[in-house]
Image (tube, rainbow, N blue to C red):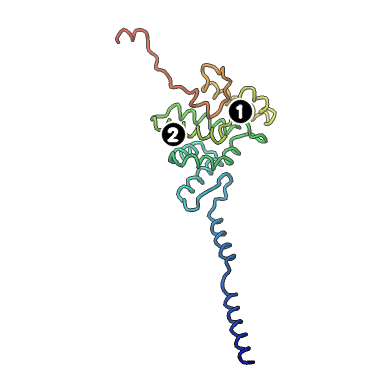
Amino acid sequence: MKGGGHSVIRRSSRASSRASSRPNSGIIVSRASSRASSIRPSVSGISKVSCCDNVNLRKRRKIIDSINNFNLKDFYDNLLEIPLNKLPYTIESMKLGYTAETTLEPSRAYLNMKGLKFVNYLYGKYQHATSNEEKNKIKSIISLFDQYGMSHGIRNSDLPIVEGQVDKRYFACYKDLYEEIYKKLFPRGNNDYYPVSLSAIPLYCKPRLQTVREDDYESL
């Protein structure tokens, strides 16, 4: 009886030592989650990123970087490279970063200088687009900015509010740039009191009509 009892204890101790040497499910889950988190982007403004989509992940990071540096050409070129079917997710995912860089604190309701510069830049690209494909792509980008609440604007009536939020030198440059863009967007006036914003570009930026002299009609 004693021998049998002793052997049972020995077997159970071996079993318990083998069990203790095996990794439990909690450790496995922990390692998997740490690997998954290591490949998620740390840049704010990107969410719901597929960890398997490395190519598109790199493109989104490039766009976020170009927002932070606000290189207008890079920002525009990177957006233009995104396929139409991936544009909605890409633009939605960069909302926080874009808004932080292009609007005034604390309300984030009005464009800052960077925001005005981007409106001006995109206006020029739209006005001088060499193909319908590029023009339609710009329209799609602007439409998605509208859809995700990223097409902030500024009206004449908002200028005193902006003046109270920034220093005098900043506001002087801001007002000059605002008035320059306003004249481009609304050359025939702005009876609708539409704000200077990205969404105004396709609405008010009409193609320039070719002028025809009266004597040209005689040759028709």
Q: Are marks 1 and 2 in contact (CB under 8 Å)?
A: no
Residue 93, placed above or below residue 123: below
Residue 162, placed above or below residue 56: above
Q: Which mark is residue 137?
A: 2
Residue 4 x %, y %: 61, 90
Q: Which mark is residue 174?
A: 1
**Quarter location, residue 46:** top right
**Quarter location, residue 129:** top left
Amino acid under label 1? Answer: Tyr
Give the structural element (helix, strand or loop) at label 1.
helix
Give the structural element (helix, strand or loop) at label 2.
helix
Q: Residue furthest right?
A: 164
Q: Is residue 158 left or right of residue 216?
A: right
Residue 170, placed above or below residue 23: above
Q: Nearer the viewer, mark 1 or mark 2?
A: 2
Residue 137 x %, y %: 44, 34
Q: Residue furthest left?
A: 219
Which residue occupies the foreground of this view, 159 or 151? 151
Residue at x 58%, y 29% (from the top left corner): 153
Residue 15 x %, y %: 58, 79
Which residue occupies the foreground of this view, 208 or 73? 208
Q: Is residue 200 left or right of residue 128?
A: right
